[in-house]
Image (cartoon, rainbow, N blue to C red):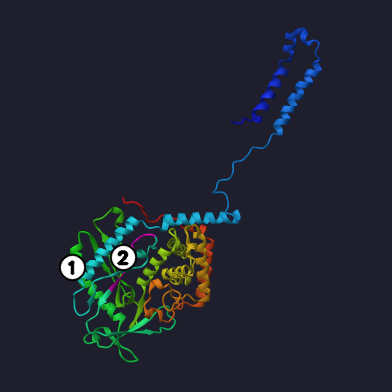
Amino acid sequence: MTAYRLNLRVFWPLVTCGCTALLGLWPALRIKAGAAWDGAPAALLRGALLALVLLACLALRCRPPRRRSPPSPQQESPVGEPRAGQEPRRRRRALLEDFYERQLRLSPHVLGHSKAHVSLVVGELVRAGKAAGRLALRGDFVQVGSAYEQHKVRSPDAFDVLVPLRLPPGLAVRVEPRSAGRRGAFVCALQVAAPGGLSEALCVEEEGGGRHLSAALLLRWFQGHVQRCLGPVRSRLQERVRVTLAVGPGRPLALHVVPRSDYVCCHLSLTVRLVPAVPFGETLFLTARPTSPGKLPAFWTLDVSKLEQRLLAWLKEQSPADSCHLRGLQILKGLRDLGGRDLEQPLASQWGRVLSSYVLKTAIFVLLLRGPLEAWADQFLVERLEDLILFLAQSLRRRLLRHVFLGNPALPEAVSLPKFVKEAAPVNLLADFEGPTLDKVAAHLLNTWQHAPQIISMYSGHRYRRTHPV
């Protein structure tokens, strides 16, 4: 049965209007009624009507207050947490997500087409350079870097590719770990036991004795070899892409690739950095990178990019489906770029070197391995970014951030590190920088995070990003 209740908000105004109408019509009713009203005490009737009017007014003033609707779930704060502390966090999260969507996130469509063009050009190049002389390209290549690890930001216009070399048969190379002072890298010397004809061209004599394969001389050979192989590649791909070679002292060898037959939105000028590498086992490479003239001419750098990709794949399997570690790394890169715009020299030139993408990736690796991985669910994005900022600032002030793989016994067994990496000496990635510089970078990093809303609003200009093909 349905229960009906008296609506006081309607009833009492009706009563008031009725009483007022009776008072107004009282003289006419008295004349019309005639003698019937003569015996009634007029004062009593008027008093009763006035009492009813006053009672109605009093009921209207004392009616119960209007009931408010309960707050929506979005307005309610979580149990045990004060709402005052949650609102700034929600606003910051909304701002960071908007910053990510408008300025950092890559278009999967454009990235996919860019990768396809890079694979096409580099594949043709290594095939052309595979059979040429006693020293040549091995015939394959390894795609490394943020574009292939799903944490690249802004425009997909730069790619890194390792090009393995095929050393002459019978050339015995022994890897010798070397100390390079305070350098934040693991460097090696390649001692050539049976150089043959290669010794005169690419080897140097060291003070301690023995001949070593020179990274600087091999870079010079690699540049000439790529230039010779680029002619046939251009002729085969002239209808699809335009390829040019960029060289310079102290800079890595790079291809500039401009697609000609593709979607209009994918006509980006792509830069493909080519890094010659000597294979060392199944997952390791020794790379030759440009250095200043006269410094470490024979030393090679250990590259563990394939191990990093293996660790990222393992973390993806173990983390929640909505894990925010890659998106947090992208936002951290974006804040680093914005935070360094107004710095003065010499801090401006050191800011990007200290907070390099490799340092930021190392920091997030360390926090992920500490666990628990459930804490990296998407709802904790702001909290994990705060942890990253504080950990980086603490590492900078301690002047210590160790390499994730070299000499680290805490890595999961599923990554299956080579014995050479397990037994290697730990490497401090911050060893190249002076203490005062690290202190300034740490202070400015904390300031950038604290004033992130103002900094993002100041530099929230337009940038290239299309989510759909034109």
**Chief secondary structure of the magenta span?**
strand
Which region shows up in magenta?
154-163
Question: In the rendered view, would you say 14 is above or below 88?
Answer: above
Q: Tell me if I can see residue 294 in this picture.
A: no
**Amino acid type of the residue that numbered disc 1 sits on in the rendered structure:** Pro
Residue 284: image quadrant is: bottom left
Q: CA distance from mark 2 to mark 1?
A: 20 Å
In this image, 409 relative to 200: left or right?
right
The location of residue 266, given as percent across then percent down, is 30, 56
Earlier in the chain: of badge 2 and badge 1, it is 1
The location of residue 206, given as percent across then percent down, is 33, 89
| Quadrant of the image containing the N terminus | top right
In this image, 305 relative to 319: left or right?
left
Question: In the rendered view, would you say 87 is above or below 14?
Answer: below
In this image, 335 relative to 132: left or right?
right
Identify the residue under disc 1.
232
Front position in the image: 255 or 187: 187
The location of residue 233, given as percent across then percent down, is 20, 66
Question: In the rendered view, would you say 295 is above or below 411?
Answer: below
Residue 10 covered by magenta stretch: no
Q: Residue at x 42, y 68 (%)?
A: 357
Front position in the image: 458 or 188: 188
Q: Which mark is residue 271?
A: 2
Q: Residues within 10 Å of mark 2 (few under 14, many from 20)?
A: many
